Image (cartoon, rainbow, N blue to C red):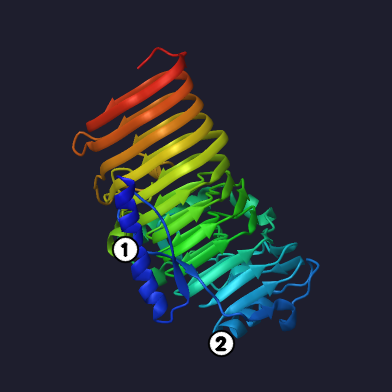
Amino acid sequence: MKLTLKLILCCAGLLSAASAFAQGRTYEPVAVEAPFPMDSVTLCHFPDRDFVITRYGARQGGETLNTRAFARAVDACHRAGGGRVVVPAGEWLTGPIHLKSNVNLHLEEGAVVRFTDNPDDYLPAVMTSWEGLECYNYSPLVYAYGCENIAITGSGTLAPRMDTWRVWFKRPQAHLNALAQLYAMASTDVPVEDRQMARGENHLRPHLIHFNRCNHVLLDGFKIRQSPFWTIHLYLCNSGVVRNLDVQAHGHNNDGIDFEMSRNFLVERCTFDQGDDAVVIKSGRNRDAWRLNTPSENIVVRHCAIRKGHVLLGIGSEMSGGVRNVYMHDCTVPESVHRLFFLKTNHRRGGFIENIYLENIEAGDMLRVFEIDTDVLYQWKDLVPTYERKLTSIRGIHIRNVHCQSADAIYELKGEAEEPIREVFVDNVRVDTVRQFVNRIHHVEGLHENGVSYGILQGAGK
């Protein structure tokens, strides 16, 4: 798409958001260029009022449990009409922090929020989700539900204790039984409030940050060191900015940031160092997502660096509500990932993936530069039956201006005969050393390849 059209679309979004701002709302538009129409991305603004947690009984040192002090500060800030809940320098031990509308949790330089790893501290259970299925589970460490204008800012650190969660990384039979139970409940329309999973040895770990059904979100400047589960999860959220984060989490299922059934977001100038995928776009699992019927859309990721991770940009595999209009550009992967760009679904998902763009990427080593796999099931393959079979429509996938030092293969596209992958554009992709093969293609209609090259081919070719 030409730059002129990008600017027209951007200006239209700015005018719309500026009108809302003029009506007295506490956010402003952020300019975002994309090769598709973008609604306005908004930046939160908060009243100039500080609520320092020490005024509400918080004590530093990592020994006193400050959960109630955080709650009192958040509540006072919210009741006053908003502002900053300030965490000063020092180490502050706490259980879950539940944000409310118009509250900015501000971590000053040298502040370390040290979350406990006692599961009882994260009860009572709250409405959340587990890998695309809604349920009531242990509270996320930082949680917000149904809020407007919420933020975490500052240069401090969120750093949970991990001893218990590391034990829970394992998937013994009791945990697998719990997953099967949740899957069955979601597949047979059991009400969400009856899906109580924070019980016994189910051991469904909580997210570090989980914002659920929130509008106008800002995450800016802070550091994360480790996470029990997915690190940042924006679920059914609309409009916001994620920027200048330093995220490091190398445990099981430690995705960097997951957008799920969320829209109108900008991610920029972040660093991700993950034990799983770095940036992931999801939209729910199977029947639960068909019920909610909310695609993830209009998400731009730019100028980010991924130190380690399984995937730079992943779509799915929980994507039954559909994913469209995702644009990642000008990012770097100086070391290695398993796959640079990975779209994954399976025969139970349904939904769609369309208008996905990855361009201007510089990367090191990987297994695949680009892969689409339509039958990815992981541990679910033999754990639960197929209640309903629905294939995923995949079309309009673009990868352009990518340079990688080495890879097993450049691209592998595995479509279905019943539902082929359609309209894929691979343009100016170069890999210095290819170890196995250049490409493998199954059931693709409309593959447009231009300027795919390599320096050394060590394998047997295509």
The span from disc 2 to disc 1 (Cα, nearest Å) is 35 Å
Give left or right: position of 23 versus 112. left
Q: Residue at x 38, y 51 (%)?
A: 318
Q: Which residue is mark 2?
A: 79
Secondary structure of residue under mark 2: helix
Q: Is residue 198 visible?
A: no
Q: Residue at x 34, y 69 (%)?
A: 16
Tell me which corner region of the image, top left, top right, bottom left or bottom right, holds residue 239: bottom left
Snapshot quadrant of residue 193: bottom left
Residue 76, percent from left and from top: 61, 85
Corner quadrant of residue 262: bottom left
As shown in the figure, which amino acid type bears the numbered disc 2? Arg
Q: Quadrant of the C terminus?
A: top left
Query: Label 1 amino acid?
Result: Ala
How crowded pointer 2 is (Cα within 10 Å; few <14, some 14-19, many 20+) is rated as few
* Residue 412 position in % (x across, y down): 36, 29
46 in relation to 12, above or below: below
| Residue under label 1 | 12
Residue occupying the point 60% across, 47% down: 251
Name the N-terminal-most of marks 2 and 1.
1
Name the image quarter holding the N terminus: top left
What is the x, y in percent for residue 311?
A: 48, 40
Q: Position of residue 123 (x, y in %)?
A: 58, 71
The correct choice, above or below, for 103 with respect to 299 in the image is: below
| Residue sitting at the far bottom | 80
